[in-house]
């Protein structure tokens, strides 16, 4: 029971037993109960099967829901998660229904107007605040429900709102660009996407305020991606110092349980705005078209947006060569003897994948 209570405490919920027969032994606010039901039932089912499958009238609901929610834009994973969200909301109807605060209602209304995922449940749920809540919960729990155009529209519409969530999101967005990209032109799309993810994170913190790390064996943390290298220590220290200075400057009070989430989010944004390309130098003398063949194969497999073929061997991270080269400490020599050997290509692909994966986080991973 002690372990169960600690688990539920992350969702701001308690469990009690009394002599009086209650409909529910879980005690908490409606928003926290609904959030818990959704994350818990999805966590144990993963869209495969869940305990309420045969409960009336779910079979009828499932059939009609799937007919309504058949647009090609919605992939199976999103559809299943939304289906469980709607079903739980339908089974957990309150009388009277709970109400949203005015500032949250204003934000939720914008999400609903831009991309109303609750439209598929309006035959079953008619309360306005309930539908707004579903739209809001769907954004913090389901990836990429909004496309780029909708993210840009959201950014332009919420900027003027008098809300602490909007204010802190805007301050952090602008501070990231000022600190890490002072000389880089930031497009409206990059600005909107950056704001969107910070905004979603702040809605989760300031409104839902639940500790979802209790659901994961390994909560997201920069430490999980770190080694003892000086390169990692430098960027980790820079992000932590930046965030501390920003929270002090703008008087943002942040619970320690969310710090790792902030650090990881900032690191991800840095990589999104300014991706690091993997630089490769190629020399091959056995075949007259050997260099061109290797180059074309690499572009076919990894794309020009991921790797850059350089002319100066000193600029390269990876050197592909058919003769010995004295590589520098931060370079890797891949010795190639024959371009027609499949095992050679397999080893080269694994090497490039490992290096590209490391660079995608700017941290020097050690992969087993």
Image (cartoon, helix red, strand yellow):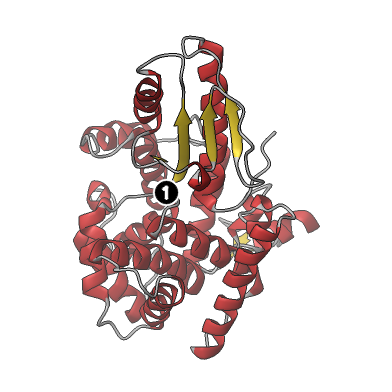
In depth, the one of 192 and 113 nearer the eye is 192
Asked if residue 128 can be seen in this view, the reply is: no
* 125 left or right of 236 in image: left
Q: Residue at x 51, y 12 (%)?
A: 338
Task: Give the residue displayed 35% in from the left and 18% down from the top.
Answer: 289
Q: Please, is residue 58 above or below residue 112 in the view?
A: above
330, above or below 60, in the image:
below
Q: Dot 1: within a 10 Å radius of its alpha carbon, few (fewer than 14), some, or many (20 or more) residues?
A: few
Query: In the depicted view, which residue is nearer to us: 41 or 257?
Result: 257
Residue 76 pos. (x, y %)? 35, 33
x and y percentages locating residue 162 in the rendered image: 31, 86
Disc 1 element: helix
- Residue 176 lies left or right of residue 134; in this view the side is right
The x and y percentages for residue 124 are 28, 49
**Residue 257 in the image: above or below residue 250:** above
> Looking at the image, which is closer to me, 360 or 64?
360
Relative placement, left or right, of 193 versus 35 is left
Image quadrant containing the N terminus: bottom right
Quadrant of the image containing the C terminus:
top right
Viewer-proximal residue among 142 and 192? 192
The number of numbered badges drawn on the structure is 1
Q: Quadrant of residue 59?
A: top left
Q: State the image coordinates of residue 186 (x, y, percent, origin top left).
A: 30, 67
Q: Which residue is mark 1?
A: 91
Query: Is residue 177 something that shows in the picture?
Result: yes
Q: Quadrant of residue 140?
A: bottom left
């Amino acid at each position: 029971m002690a372990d169960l209570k600690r688990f539920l405490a992350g969702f701001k919920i308690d469990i009690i037993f009394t002599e009086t027969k209650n409909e529910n032994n879980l005690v908490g606010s409606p928003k926290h109960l609904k959030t818990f039901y959704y994350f818990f039932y999805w966590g144990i089912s993963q869209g495969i099967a869940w305990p309420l499958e045969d409960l009336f009238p779910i079979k009828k609901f499932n059939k009609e829901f799937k007919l309504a929610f058949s647009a090609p834009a919605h992939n199976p994973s999103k559809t299943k998660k939304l289906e469980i969200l709607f079903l739980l909301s339908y089974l957990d109807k309150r009388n009277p229904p709970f109400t949203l605060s005015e500032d949250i209602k204003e934000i939720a209304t914008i999400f609903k107007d831009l991309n109303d995922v609750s439209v598929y449940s309006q035959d079953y749920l008619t309360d306005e605040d309930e539908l707004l809540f579903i739209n809001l919960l769907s954004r913090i729990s389901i990836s990429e429900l909004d496309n780029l155009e909708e993210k840009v529209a959201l950014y332009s519409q919420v900027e003027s709102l008098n809300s602490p969530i909007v204010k802190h999101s805007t301050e952090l967005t602008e501070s990231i660009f000022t600190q890490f990209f002072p000389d880089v032109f930031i497009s409206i799309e990059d600005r909107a996407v950056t704001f969107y993810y910070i905004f979603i994170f702040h809605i989760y913190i300031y409104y839902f305020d639940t500790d979802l790390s209790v659901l994961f064996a390994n909560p997201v943390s920069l430490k999980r991606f770190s080694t003892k290298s000086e390169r990692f220590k430098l960027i980790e220290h820079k992000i932590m110092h930046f965030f501390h200075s920003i929270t002090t400057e703008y008087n943002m009070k942040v619970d320690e349980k969310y710090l790792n989430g902030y650090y990881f989010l900032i690191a991800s944004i840095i990589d999104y705005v300014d991706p690091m390309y993997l630089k490769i130098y190629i020399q091959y003398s056995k075949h007259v078209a050997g260099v061109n063949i290797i180059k074309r194969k690499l572009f076919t497999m990894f794309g020009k947006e991921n790797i850059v073929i350089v002319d100066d061997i000193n600029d390269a991270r990876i050197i592909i060569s058919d003769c010995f080269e004295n590589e520098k400490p931060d370079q890797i020599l891949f010795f190639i003897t024959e371009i027609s050997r499949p095992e050679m290509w397999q080893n080269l692909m694994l090497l490039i994948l490992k290096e590209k994966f490391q660079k995608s986080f700017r941290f020097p991973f050690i992969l087993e």
